[in-house]
Amino acid sequence: MKSTLRRFLVNNRLLLAVVLIALGFWTGFSVTWWIAWIPFLVAIIMVTAHFMVGPMTLIQGYVENGDMEGAQKLLDKVKYPNLLYKPIRSSYYMLRANFSTMGEDLDKAEADLKKGLEAGMPEKEYEGTAYLQLGSIAYKKGDTKAALEHLRKAVKIGLPDEDSKATAFLQLSSLYLQRRDFKSAKLYFNKAKSAKATNDQVVSQIKEMTKYMARIPG
């Protein structure tokens, strides 16, 4: 019941603001202007919330429930992202970048990640994650110089979990292997193993790379 009411309020802020403004005028002309300011004030708050917060407070619930289509529809309702409050704006661009990555639209994902970083991340770990994603995108696009730069920055800033750290170190190791810098490749590979990843895909990548690393001299 509470979640349904919350969704209704968030999705209909502008309509409710119009109703409240009309109520304010009716109260002012029919009763007293001393009370009319209350619906006017609530209407102003709703309009401000519509443009500065948007539907972002609802999206987390959709993501947690695995309803990516619902989350995407809410993101699409944001028509003026530059008006969003800065920390919320960065979250908006990060989420949009994740959806673009899932859809293999790497150029759009890269652009959104950069916009999110420009808006300012609320925590350093989120900033590290953004640079990890930028590094992964550059890696997929074959831009090894940009990939190295972003991945080093991600590691330096800090990442939120062991799987992210292992992923960053593995990609750095692969990049140095391409450059035939075997010493650096082994260094970052050992860091990837030390990260104690639990994600099945990351663990599998480490196992596969262990066999390859064993054949490298030095």
Image (cartoon, rainbow, N blue to C red):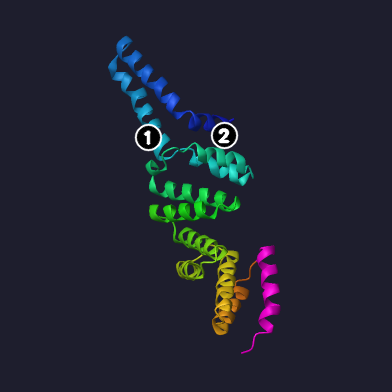
Dot 1: what SS? helix
Q: Main secondary structure of the magenta part?
A: helix
Is the residue 101 above or below the residue 199 in the image? above
| Residues drawn in magenta | 198-218
Q: Which comes before the other along the chain, label 2 or label 1?
A: 2
Q: Is residue 204 left or right of residue 13?
A: right
| Quadrant (top left/top right/bottom left/bottom right) for the N terminus | top right
Which residue is pictured at 41% across the width and 49% down the height? 87
x and y percent of residue 208 in the render?
Answer: 70, 73
x and y percent of residue 105 in the render?
Answer: 56, 52
x and y percent of residue 68 in the render?
Answer: 61, 44
Q: Which mark is residue 165?
A: none
Which residue is pictured at 59% across the width and 53% down the height? 104
Q: Which residue is mark 2?
A: 3
Work out which residue is located at the far top of the displayed protein and give it.
30
Marks 2/1: CA–CA distance: 21 Å
Q: Is residue 7 left or right of residue 193?
A: left
Which residue is pictured at 49% across the width and 56% down the height? 110
Q: Which residue is mark 1?
A: 48
Q: Is residue 212 on the magenta stretch?
A: yes
x and y percent of residue 62 in the render?
Answer: 59, 42
Can residue 122 be seen here? The reply is no
As shown in the figure, which amino acid type bears the numbered disc 2?
A: Ser
